[in-house]
Image (tube, helix red, strand yellow):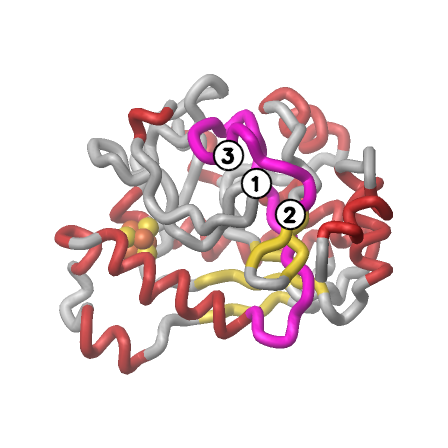
Amino acid sequence: MDRSIFESYAGLEGEQLLGPILRDFAGKAAVVSSFGAESAVLLHMVAQVDKATPVIFLDTGKHFWETLSYRAKLIDRLGLTGVRIITPDEGDLAAQDADGTLHKTNADACCHIRKTLPLQKALEGFDVTISGRKRYHGAARATLDFLSIADGRLKVEPLAGFSALDIAGYMKAHDLPAHPLTEIGYFSIGCEPCTQAGGDAADPRAGRWAGSAKTECGIHWTHNGQTIAAPSRSAH
Ligand code: SF4
């Protein structure tokens, strides 16, 4: 895969980008979703094209029960049949996080064994990954491109140009259910130990790893294909 592929999708975003990608790479494209605060938008778009699209959910073992409940609700509502629930390697957990508290002492290592390694394995065999990140989330996401190449795969971000208002408008237009935690002040939702209520359209991820420099879990890439490890919060 090289950057010449970008020409085929130049100027497209949202459903106009997602549709051709899913059709052109049928069986070779996977969506990665956290079933978090804004996930319903991308998942709804996916369902309009092909409900059997592989959707990877990383079940870290640390999610809010509300997220697991919301996942079931969205799968049912959208008719998604390709959701794959991926869990960490038992051996890695036993060796590095036997008591489940690694997130307190080394969050990067915790994300590595609970997210990064399981995702790498889950993506074997796929040529294209699709996620729902937005530039308005700032920090390392502020320069996100719709298309990039990372690890030989095409990385697609159909919602890169969406604002908080665009997301809210799409949710309303399609009567999509909200994640229950958004109704009690959570703007961005990840694992329970590393997520606090808070955030707003100006700093949506303020509640993620609050009080530390960590802003990303390491499963995503920058616009130029570099892995995002843990860019400093001061980069805002
Ligand atoms: S977000 Fe927190 S609990 Fe979840 S994998 Fe990363 S460090 Fe561990």
Residue in the image at 82% along x and 38% along y: 10
Label 2, secondary structure: give it. Answer: strand
Point out residue 216 in the picture as x, y percentages from the top left corner: 38, 43
Residue 108 position in % (x across, y down): 27, 53
Towards the viewer: 32 or 127: 127
Label 1 – label 2 distance at C-alpha: 6 Å
Identify the residue shown where x is 18% and y is 54%.
106
Q: How crowded is mark 1: few (under 14 residues within 10 Å), some or many (20 or more)?
A: many
Q: What element carries label 3?
A: helix
Pointer 2 residue: 148
Q: Which amino acid does label 1 sit on?
A: His
| Image label count | 3
Q: In which quarter of the image is the C terminus?
A: top left
Q: Point out the frontmost of discs 2 and 3.
A: 2
Towards the viewer: 143 or 111: 143
Question: Would residue 70 be seen by someone viewing this image from the given angle?
Answer: no
Tell me, yes or no, whether the two marked residues, 1 and 2, touch with CB atoms within 8 Å.
Answer: yes
Residue 32 in percent (x, y) is at: 57, 56
- Give the residue at mark 3: 141
Q: Quadrant of residue 23?
A: bottom right
Residue 109 position within the rendered picture, expressed as x and y whole percent measured from the top left: 25, 59
> Residue beneath label 1, please?
223
Residues at discs 3 and 1 in contact (Cβ within 8 Å) = no
Residue at the image position 13 percent from the left and 53 percent from the top: 105
